[in-house]
Amino acid sequence: MAQPLIASRWAAARWLVVAPHADDETLGAGALIAHAAKHGRLGGVVYLTDGTGSHPDGTPRLAIVRKAEARGALRRLGAGDVRVDWLGWRDAHPHEAGSAAFRRSAATLAGWLRDRKIDAIAVSDRLDRHCDHQAAYRLAQAAASIARRGVSVFGYHVWSVPAAGARRLRTPPMPPGKRRAALHAHRSQTTPLLGDGFRLAARQVRMQADDILTLRRIAS
C-alpha cells in the first residue's frame, strides 16, 4: 500500500526530478512534477543524456529537437518556468560508476541539491532495465551521499513496477488528458517526425493519473 505523498513527511519537500531521457519525466514523474510545480516545490528537472541515441542519425539537430520537446512537455505539465539542466551524457553510453566523468557529474548534481535546498530526488528506479535509467539512479544516490544535506531518494517507474514490500508514496493524481498532452509534446518519440527510430509502445502511452515513488534512500 502506498502512502499518500500529501500525508507523508515529504508533503512539503522541495523536489528535484532526474530523468535519463527527455520523455521519462512525463512517463514516470509527470504527476509529481505537476503537483510540486503547482505548490512551488519543484527545484528543477535534470536530464542525464543528450537523447541522440533514439534515432539512427544521432545528429546534433536531434539533441536540439529533444530539448525543445522536453520544455514543451514541462509547460504542458504546468512547470514551464522550472529550471532545466542537461548533464549531456551520450545516450545509451553511460559513464561507469567511479569514473572521473561520473564523479564530476555527481559533484555537479550534489551542488545543485545544496544550492536549491532540495529535500528529495525522484529518479528512474534501479529496477528499470535500461542502462541509462540505472545510471541515473546510481548518479542520484551518489550525489545525495555527498551533498552535505539531508536528501531522500525515490525511484519512479518507467520500465518497471514497484517491488512488493518497499516503502512507497502515491502522488496526487493529475488529469490523464493533460499528461497525455505532455507526452505528445515528445513528437520524436511518438510520431515519425524524424523518420525511423524509437517509438513508445502503446502500453507506455497509457499512463495512470498518479505516480508511485519507491523510497530508496531516506535522509538522516
Image (tube, rainbow, N blue to C red):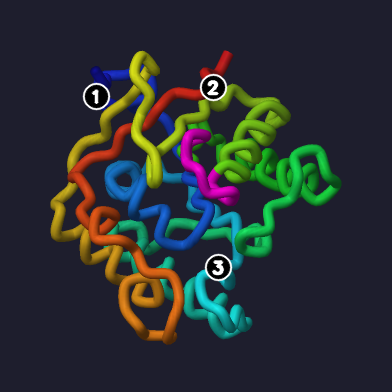
Q: Which mark, residue 217? A: 2
Q: Nearer the viewer, residue 70 or 113?
A: 70
Q: Which mark, residue 45? A: none
* Residue 181 sits above or below residue 127 on the image: below
| Other-residue count near label 3 (Cα within 10 Å), few / some / many at <14 / 14–19 / ≥20 | many
Callout 3, which amino acid? Gly
* Span shown in magenta: 124-133
Element class at badge 2? strand
Quadrant of residue 76 in the image?
bottom left
Earlier sequence position, callout 2 versus callout 3: 3
Q: Which mark, residue 4? A: 1
Q: CA distance from mark 2 to mark 3?
A: 27 Å
Say which residue appears at 50% left-offset and 24% top-offset. 216
Instruction: Indicate which label's residue lies in the foreground, 2 or 3.
Output: 3
Say which residue appears at 58% left-offset and 72% top-offset. 52
Q: CA distance from mark 1 to mark 2?
A: 18 Å
To which residue does mark 3 refer? 51
Say which residue appears at 56% left-offset and 76% top-offset. 63
Callout 2, which amino acid? Arg
